[in-house]
Amino acid sequence: MGKELRLVLVLTIICVVSAAVLGWINFLTEPVIKDQRELAKQKALQEVLPTATEFQAEPALIEDISQSGVTGIMEIYRGFSGEEQEGFVFTVDQQGYASVIRMVVGVTLDGKLAGLSVISQTETPGLGAEVTDEEFLSQPAFRRAKIGDQLGVTKDNGEVEAIASATISSRAVVRGVNAALTAAGLLLAEENGIGGVSGD
C-alpha cells in the first residue's frame, strides 16, 4: 500500500510540474504568437488592397451586412492611405469540400476587385488545397470582377476555371468573392446615400 501511495504521489508531482512548465511556456510564447498572427493579417490585408497602408476594423458593419442576407463575412476593414480611404477588405468564410475556406478580398472605392488571397484551409492536398495557388486566384475572371457581378465556375456557366477534380473548393472561393462584392456594393451605396445596408 505504501509503495502504491508513493507512486501516486510521484505521478501527481510530475503532473503538477509538467502543467506548471507548460503554463510558463505558454505565458512566454503567447504574445509572440499573437504578434506573428497580427503581422500575417496585416500582410494579407495589404496584399489584397495594395494602395492602402493602414486598416481600420469595422465590426459594427458585420451585423448590418448579415441582416442584408450576405453570408460568410467575418471581418470588415476600411483601408486608408493617409486620410484617404482606398476601399474595403473583407475576411470571408465559405464551406469547401473538407474544410471552411477563409479568404481575404479587397474591393476599391470604385467597386473593382483589388485582390484575393486564401489564408486558411485544410482541403485535400493536391486537389482542393490548390485554391491557394496564384494561378487559380489570378484568373482574368477574378481580375475583371466588380460590384454587380455574380461569378461562377465554368461548370456552372461562369468564367472561373475550377481546379481539376476540386469543383466544390473552387465554388467556395467564388462564393466568397461574390459575398465580398455584394457587401462592398451595399456599403458603398450607403456611403453614397443611395440605399445600402440600412435599406434607406
Image (cartoon, rainbow, N blue to C red):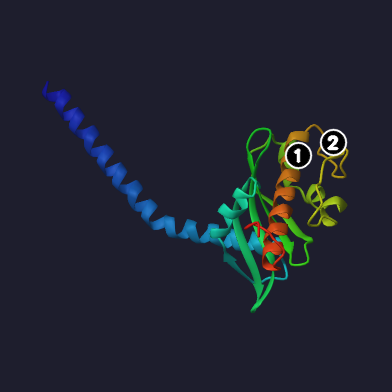
Nearest to the eye among marks 2 and 1: give it: 2
- Please give the label number shown on residue 156: 2
| x then y, percent, for residue 134 | 78, 51
For the residues labelled 2 and 1, the Cα–Cα distance comes to 9 Å
Q: Is residue 52 visible?
A: yes
Residue 103 placed where, x, y %?
A: 67, 50
- At mark 2, the secondary structure is helix
SS assignment at label 1: helix
Instruction: Identify the residue under disc 1.
Output: 171
Vertical placement of residue 197 versus 173, above or below: below
Given the image, on which type of amino acid does mark 2 rest? Asp
- Local crowd at mark 2 within 10 Å, few (<14), some, or many (≥20)? few
Residue 136 relative to residue 38: left or right: right
User: Residue placed at 74% from the left, 67% from the top?
Assistant: 109
- The answer to whether residue 159 is left or right of residue 24 is right
Left or right position of 27 against 158: left
Task: Give residue 131's quadrant in the image.
Answer: top right
Q: Quadrant of the C terminus?
A: bottom right
Which is nearer the eye, 187 or 107? 187
Label 1 amino acid?
Answer: Arg
* Farthest front residue in view: 200
Nearest to the observer: residue 170 or residue 30: 170
Q: Residue at x 33, y 49 (%)?
A: 23
Query: Residue at left 60%, top 49%?
Result: 66
The x and y percentages for residue 36 are 53, 59
Name, please, the residue furthest toward the bottom. 82
- Do the numbered discs 2 and 1 sit on residues whose CB atoms are within 8 Å? yes
